[in-house]
Image (spheres, coloured by chain):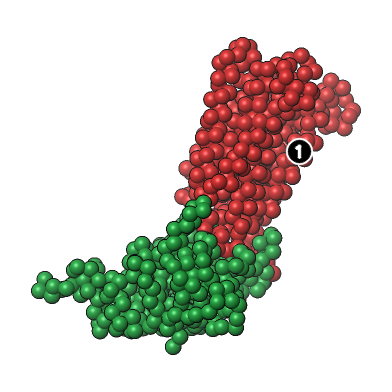
Amino acid sequence: MSGLGRMSGGPGARRPGPGGLVLDGLTVGHRRGRRTRPVLEGLCAHAARGELTVLIGPNGSGKSTLLRTLAGLLPPLRGAALLDGDDLLGLAAPERARRVGVVLTDRPDGGLLTGRDVVALGRYPHTGATGALRPQDHACVDEAIDAVGAGGLAERRLQELSDGERQRLLVARALAQRPSLLLLDEPSAFLDVSARVALLGVLRRLSREQDLCVLISTHDLELALRLADTAWLLDGDGAFDTGSPAELAGSGAIGRAFDTEELAFDPDAGVFRLRDAGDGAAPPDRVPEITRSAVVDADAAPPGHR
Amino acid sequence: MTGTLRGAARGRGNDGRANPPDPADGGAGDRSGRTVAAVLLGLLAAVAVAFALAVALGSVTIPPAETVRSLLGAGDPRLGVLVRDVRVPRAAAAALVGAGLGAAGLLTQTLFRNPLAEPYVLGVSAGAGLGVALYVTAGTGAVAAFATGGLGAAQGGVSRLGSVGAAALGAAILLGLVLLLSRWTRSTVTLLVVGVMVGSVVTSVVSLLLVWTDPRTAQQYLVWGLGSVDGVALADLPVLGGIVVAGLLGVALLAKPLDALLLGDDYAATMGVDVARVRGGVLVVAAVLAGTVTAFCGPVGFLGIAVPHLARLAVGTSRHRVLVPATVLTGALVGLGCAIVGHPPGTGTVLPLNVVTSLVGAPVVIVVLLRSRRLAAGSVG
């Protein structure tokens, strides 16, 4: 089991190191002129290839800032991030696009582009100046569409699709870039429960099948903890813990980050419970009860519109 | 049908759009490569026919046989002058105006992801207007001599070359200003607002100049503002045509990153697009196209907004590899149509270009958009 947390090493050092993503004293935040406002400081962590890593934390704890920095949309303030031993944050944009696929919280309209057009955009960093697709690019696009089970969506327009379908095509687009690292910012934010389970199941399966390092930020704590191999936990006060979901739950770190006056995390059941048990059952809207079997089903057979 | 079968059925080595449209699609999806090629060829043929009509028809009735003779240099020398020195340049200018403004409009609509964006939101027409206003109000004065290198002073009043030079200079200065401001903002939306604001400041300066000047001078500015392809002479065509064609090549080179921009600036950046550089390229190409057209023909409204929408309707896709040629051809066609309508055969009158584009063209576009079953027709991405 990897991803047990804090690694050490000189910043920016290039070395054979472990595969996947390594944060090495990374400080992220915002820069305005000469003033910097760090959001998260000195992060050290490891997300292995072939594993699903979840980034969890309350609103405003810096999840998006970290992901946007890793995606190259925000300059880092200090420190380094290594991808398979190379300086990720120093890569030129086209090279980064060949190694990192990103799904953002934006919900693009896509004009008159079809699902297949959108997935084909993932070949952008691999094609020439005209953007013409070669046979191997078409094969790659087909493969990416199949991988997320979106065969029935390929000829429909992006703007006609539901949020869940759109999100799956955007994941396929990222896969078509043939990355080794997949970054997803709140991929399930607009989805209903079954679509969330399906999407996270697809991501977990992809991490294994394609030996991808998958890092997602999510608010869907209970589902994330069930499916993830590793969790990166931000508690909102700048503290950062990594480990397997079981370790983080057992050590009480999750409770410290998320507990409120009314709700407390129950590490044994992996769900939140009302502190005052006399008040009755936990409100169902705060506690989506997802059964083991639903998760396993989603994992084994990705739903598709066929 | 599984995705694998679908993939295997697709013809390899094709453009990739050659797979037949899914019958279950209800016609809402993309059109196949063959249909797109047919549409583009049809547009090309229509442009050729419209060009012939624009040369053959006009306020003065000339029989077709006489028109052909005049083109060949035989026949009545007076009609020859009319055909070769007036109608051919007019038709060519109309096609160039439509193609240039249409392509520039497509660039701005994709860059700002706004269906109402047009090249003039970059302030180029306001800049050109300021140049012309300064020129006509200063007459043969120092400003005009500076703006045109003295070329404009020839006729003692306002010359054509003078106003072209003044408009080009004004558009170029505004382009420089907008480019400078664009370096300070990462947000495309901010840039759009800045462009509109700069344009309105410049327009109000123009209004001040006109209020303070002799009404007869102001009249000259107003006539320029109506837009016209009549003033373009045979000698202007190499300059107008050369710059517009170069600009259209620039648009073609931008087709790949423009597709990525349809998903938004951030997504484009994660796919390897240098967003700042593409944005600079788009601004320069759009402003050069619109500025050149405006310098020669005045600020021509409506084409920049409408032509890209008509082109999207024609080809049913937002992929710029298809949409750019479709927009250029549609623009040339619409421009020629406006020129034909603006010179009603046998009436001896000429309608101002902006009157035709807006009064006739806008309702046509509204009807076309509303009648089309494609609800998505107005979208840009």
x and y percentages locating residue A175 in the rendered image:
54, 72
Q: Choose between B150 and A2: the one closer to the eye.
A: A2
Residue behind mark 1: B241
- Asked whether, in this view, residue A141 is left or right of residue A58, the answer is right
x and y percentages locating residue B381 in the rendered image:
51, 52
Q: Which chain is red?
A: B
Q: Callout 1 environment at 10 Å: few (<14), some (14 to 19), or many (20+)?
A: some
From where the camera sits, is residue A180 visible?
no
- What amino acid does circle 1 point to? Gly
- Against B298, residue A283 (above or below) is below
Where on the picture, by quarter, is residue A165? bottom left
- Against B62, residue A267 (above or below) is below
For the view shown, which residue lies furthest in the left direction? A278
Q: Choose between B352 and A213: the one closer to the eye.
A: A213
Residue at the spot x=53%, y=30% of the render? B200
x and y percentages locating residue A271 in the rendered image:
26, 77
Assign a secondary structure to mark 1. helix
- Against A291, residue A186 (above or below) is above
Residue at the spot x=84%, y=20% of the render? B78
For the view shown, which residue lies furthest in the bottom direction? A1
Palette colour of chain A: green
Residue at the spot x=23%, y=68% of the render? A260
